[in-house]
Image (cartoon, helix red, strand yellow):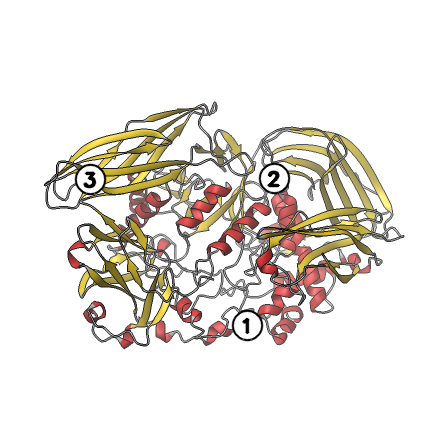
């Protein structure tokens, strides 16, 4: 994570400079608030921390506590120290006081007093709410030389304040993240300040041949005398200019003449096109009070993309988004920040790289709205982002029906909520990756709250769809959001996802804003990093035991449902290794079916699937729950199940009607393909084979290749191999299913908000009796290019019998046998029949390998583990 900066002083002469670090101390050690920013105040014993640091993150950076990711270490951290305010102090060095000076910030969790040179600038009633934006003019309080600024930050309480919380996702950090999570900017300018530069875009759809760009900026005269200012610059390379007269202390919004672009470079989600960006640059020049010559007073800039986002409700009421006139199945997951809100740009980039590797096109942020760099990354990468407020705490305290922790609102909360909406709308409006905003999560806002939000959004020129709630609840003005939140959140069998008959289920219809099969057991490598041997024993032996690393909720803190299903379907685990490998199979088939069912039903004529947000993409902590990859960036069965399901061209099996469909997520039609389906008994005997030609329209189109008929003589557990090839015979998609003649049976009448009971299980226990197979690694090659390393390997089943090498998992490991992470494989968890081979490519950073020589570790269900040097 981000390192500690010893520097707590800033030389501020540029237009906008972030304070690089602070000294922090408990208010218990400071008897006089005003003294903190007076000359000569002693800071012995104060801890230097980086910018964007919560109190606990700062203490951890100084080694005050053992690894809180490990076991129950976080329980031992004293919470009492976080029940009082903490000070953040820094020095501001000025060589020029002819310019005005401002403190510009948001991201305080969640209240603060601000002091400058012994003066209280703003108190905790003014600096309230994580997402409120503040622009404090401190010109009259600073002088040449060293100036002291300090923030007295009060304890964070998500149930009382409009801030950030963790709900039931993980254990709540002991400090509740009190502190700073965004930069404190020092701005310098002349008498006229520019703020909020942005561009309103209008793209002609469907031709995409013209775009109208209207640039706007707030122009503010902070001096005591009237001024005339000319604001000039460029939008998309086209010159623009306006002259405006401002009275003393007056602010005006300047709207420039609309610029029309012919044949604009259009921004697309990654799988549909490119991500060109345009820029807006502005300078305010002032003709002085004492000087005739114009001089530059302030500058502003913004990056933006040209794209058009619309949404409608299907005839069945599901929310359907279109990008640049093209309907799009939203395939996403719920993104988590790191639990202590430590910002590490490379780590965040790695997580977003995994999103693309998984074939997803969107991520949902339920609260935890990350800093500006996050959205700059998603813009460049073509990843859609759906931000919104979080559920179940103060954000929904005024509208929930009880049973949740959020307190009812008081009068002071309404302007904070509106200011929060204004701050985030102004911050996010120019980012083309931000395609919507959810002003409610589990609950929709009431009339007063909704009006405040919508007024703030309109004033900020918000252009993309605003959604009332992530559930089926309606708001007075917006009506239905067209989303559902029917669960499940715990284990259900793969066939569950294909259901469309039950209106209270999470099956593949409509827009499901959060849903998954719950447990996310990580790899053995990761488990050994954060659980003790005793905890590992409990994990596989006692599914009913409460697990600190699963959830803080009593509903989700054990593995009873998952444990019953694992034993009922695959056979009782024999040991920890057996438990983990069976867990990965269960997670792979479940996650794959979840995404495949929604992709198949996207083009249905009635009640189509329009969106799916997997709950969740990742955990912010060492977790056993709700994750496609873990906090260390290792990948388990869930990861590869999702990656397989979201291939651009994909062949898949349907658990409900045994049809085999081909899904095309690319923009163009795919013609002349061949779909081959083979069904095998576990002894390798082929029981069915059929090949058919298929063509598939683009944009999420579907074509049914064939339906597997009833087959006589199948073993109770059997395998189905699906292969899609292009006209030249090249393999485009390969998909293997482990199935049973005995189906999973659900009791729909007892569906609860978090799962549907399973009354009898499919029998997949035959997999444990697969005959041994041998896998050989050929053509190993490792190439280093700059900071990147690529290792290629061809895996071949060299068995002489008929049994496949099942679920072959491949890792890059270092000299100590530890996995090199992050890593992106072209494919993984493959199943190979005798004589078959697959070539895999892994990409990773040289720095993560260190001085080690890379090796390939190959682990399969029915083959011995082998580790082979990859050079």
Q: Which residue occupies 12% across, 42% down?
A: 248
Q: Residue at label 2?
A: 599
Question: Which numbered mark, 1 or 3, is in the foreground of this view?
Answer: 3
Dot 2 or dot 3: first in sequence order is: 3
Q: CA distance from mark 2 to mark 1?
A: 39 Å
Q: Residues within 10 Å of mark 3 (few under 14, many from 20)?
A: some
Q: Quadrant of residue 111?
A: bottom left
Question: Which numbered mark, 2 or 3, is in the foreground of this view?
Answer: 3
Q: Residues within 10 Å of mark 1 (few under 14, many from 20)?
A: some
* Residue 145 on image: x %, y %: 21, 61
**Image disc number at residue 295:** 3
Q: The residue tagged with tag 2: helix, strand or loop?
A: helix
Dot 1 or dot 3: first in sequence order is: 1
Give the vertical position of 235 relative to 339 (above or below): above
Give the vertical position of 148 relative to 481 (above or below): below
In this figure, what is the number of numbered marks? 3
Left or right of 568, for residue 430: left
Q: Residues within 10 Å of mark 2 (few under 14, many from 20)?
A: many
Q: The residue tagged with tag 3: helix, strand or loop?
A: strand
Q: Are marks 2 and 3 in contact (CB under 8 Å)?
A: no
**Image disc number at residue 71:** 1
Q: Nearer the viewer, residue 230 or 206?
A: 230
* Residue 828 on image: x %, y %: 69, 51
Q: CA distance from mark 1 to mark 3?
A: 61 Å
Left or right of 841, for residue 122: left
């Amino acid at each position: 994570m981000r390192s500690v900066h010893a520097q707590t002083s800033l030389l501020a002469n540029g237009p906008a400079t972030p304070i690089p670090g602070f000294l922090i101390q408990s208010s218990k050690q400071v008897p006089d608030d005003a003294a903190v920013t007076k000359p000569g105040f002693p800071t012995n014993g104060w801890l230097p921390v980086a910018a964007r640091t919560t109190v606990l993150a700062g203490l951890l950076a100084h080694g005050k506590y053992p690894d809180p990711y490990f076991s129950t270490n976080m329980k031992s951290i004293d919470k009492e120290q976080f029940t009082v305010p903490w000070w953040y102090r820094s020095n501001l060095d000025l060589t020029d006081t002819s310019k005005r000076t401002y403190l510009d910030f948001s991201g305080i969790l969640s209240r603060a007093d601000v002091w400058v040179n012994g003066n209280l600038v703003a108190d905790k009633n003014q600096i309230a709410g994580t997402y409120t934006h503040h622009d404090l003019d401190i010109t009259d309080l600073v002088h040449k030389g060293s100036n002291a600024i300090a923030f007295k930050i009060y304890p964070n309480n998500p149930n009382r304040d409009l801030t950030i919380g963790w709900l039931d996702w993980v254990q709540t950090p002991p400090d509740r993240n009190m502190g700073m999570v965004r930069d404190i900017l020092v701005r310098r300018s002349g008498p006229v300040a520019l703020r909020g530069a942005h561009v309103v875009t209008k793209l002609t759809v469907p031709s995409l041949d013209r775009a109208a760009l209207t640039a706007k900026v707030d122009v503010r005269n902070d001096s005591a005398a009237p001024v005339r200012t000319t604001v000039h610059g460029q939008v998309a390379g086209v010159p623009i200019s306006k002259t405006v007269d401002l009275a003393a202390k007056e602010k005006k919004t300047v709207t420039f003449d609309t610029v029309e672009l012919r044949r604009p470079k259009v921004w697309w989600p990654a799988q549909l096109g490119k991500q060109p960006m345009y820029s807006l640059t502005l300078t305010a020049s002032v003709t002085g009070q004492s000087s005739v010559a114009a001089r530059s007073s302030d500058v502003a800039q913004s990056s933006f993309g040209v794209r058009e986002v619309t949404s409608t409700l299907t005839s069945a009421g599901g929310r359907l988004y279109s990008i640049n006139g093209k309907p799009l199945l939203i395939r996403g997951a719920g993104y988590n920040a790191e639990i202590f809100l430590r910002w590490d740009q490379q780590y965040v980039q790695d997580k977003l790289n995994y999103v693309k590797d998984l074939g997803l096109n969107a991520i949902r942020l339920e609260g935890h709205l990350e800093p500006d760099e996050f959205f700059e990354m998603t813009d460049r990468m073509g990843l859609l982002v759906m931000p919104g407020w979080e559920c179940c705490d103060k954000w929904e305290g005024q509208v929930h029906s009880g049973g949740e922790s959020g307190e009812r609102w008081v009068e002071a909360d309404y302007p904070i909520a509106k200011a929060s909406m204004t701050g985030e709308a102004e911050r996010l409006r120019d980012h083309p990756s931000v395609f919507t905003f959810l002003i409610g999560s589990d609950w929709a806002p009431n009339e007063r709250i909704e009006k405040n939000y919508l007024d703030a959004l309109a004033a900020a020129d918000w252009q993309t769809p605003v959604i009332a709630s992530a559930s089926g609840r309606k708001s007075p003005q917006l009506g239905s959001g067209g989303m559902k939140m029917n669960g499940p959140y715990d284990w259900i069998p793969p066939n569950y996802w294909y259901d469309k008959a039950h209106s209270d289920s999470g099956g593949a219809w409509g827009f499901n804003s959060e849903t998954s099969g719950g447990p996310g057991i990580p790899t053995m490598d990761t488990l050994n990093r954060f659980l003790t041997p005793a905890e590992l024993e409990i994990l596989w032996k006692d599914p009913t035991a409460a697990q600190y690393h699963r959830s803080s909720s009593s509903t989700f803190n054990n593995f009873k449902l998952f444990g019953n299903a694992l034993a009922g379907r695959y056979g009782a685990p024999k040991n920890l290794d057996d438990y983990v490998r069976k867990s990965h199979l269960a997670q792979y088939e479940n996650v794959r079916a979840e995404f495949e069912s929604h992709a198949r039903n996207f083009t249905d004529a009635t009640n189509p699937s329009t969106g799916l947000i997997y709950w969740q993409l990742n955990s912010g902590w060492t977790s056993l729950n709700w994750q496609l990859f873990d906090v260390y960036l290792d990948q388990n069965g869930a990861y590869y199940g999702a990656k397989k399901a979201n291939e651009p061209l994909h062949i898949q099996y349907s658990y409900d009607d045994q049809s085999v469909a081909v899904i095309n997520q690319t923009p163009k039609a795919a013609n002349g393909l061949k779909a081959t389906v083979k069904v095998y008994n576990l002894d390798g005997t082929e029981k069915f084979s059929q090949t058919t030609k298929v063509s598939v329209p683009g944009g999420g189109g579907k074509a049914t290749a064939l339906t597997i008929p009833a087959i006589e003589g199948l073993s109770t557990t059997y395998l189905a191999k699906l292969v899609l090839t292009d006209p030249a015979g090249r393999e485009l998609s390969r998909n293997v299913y482990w199935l049973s003649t005995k189906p999973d049976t659900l009791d729909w009448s007892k569906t609860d908000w978090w799962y549907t009971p399973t009354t009898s299980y499919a029998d997949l226990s035959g997999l444990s009796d697969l005959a041994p197979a041998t896998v050989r690694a050929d053509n190993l090659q490792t190439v280093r290019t700059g900071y990147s390393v690529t290792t290629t390997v061809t895996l071949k089943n060299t068995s002489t019998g008929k049994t496949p090498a099942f679920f072959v998992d491949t890792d890059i490991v270092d000299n100590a046998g530890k996995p090199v992470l992050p890593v992106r494989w072209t494919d993984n968890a493959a199943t190979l029949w005798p004589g078959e081979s697959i070539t895999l490519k892994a990409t990773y950073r040289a720095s993560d390998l260190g001085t080690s020589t890379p090796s390939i570790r190959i682990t399969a269900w029915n083959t011995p583990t082998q580790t082979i040097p990859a050079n």
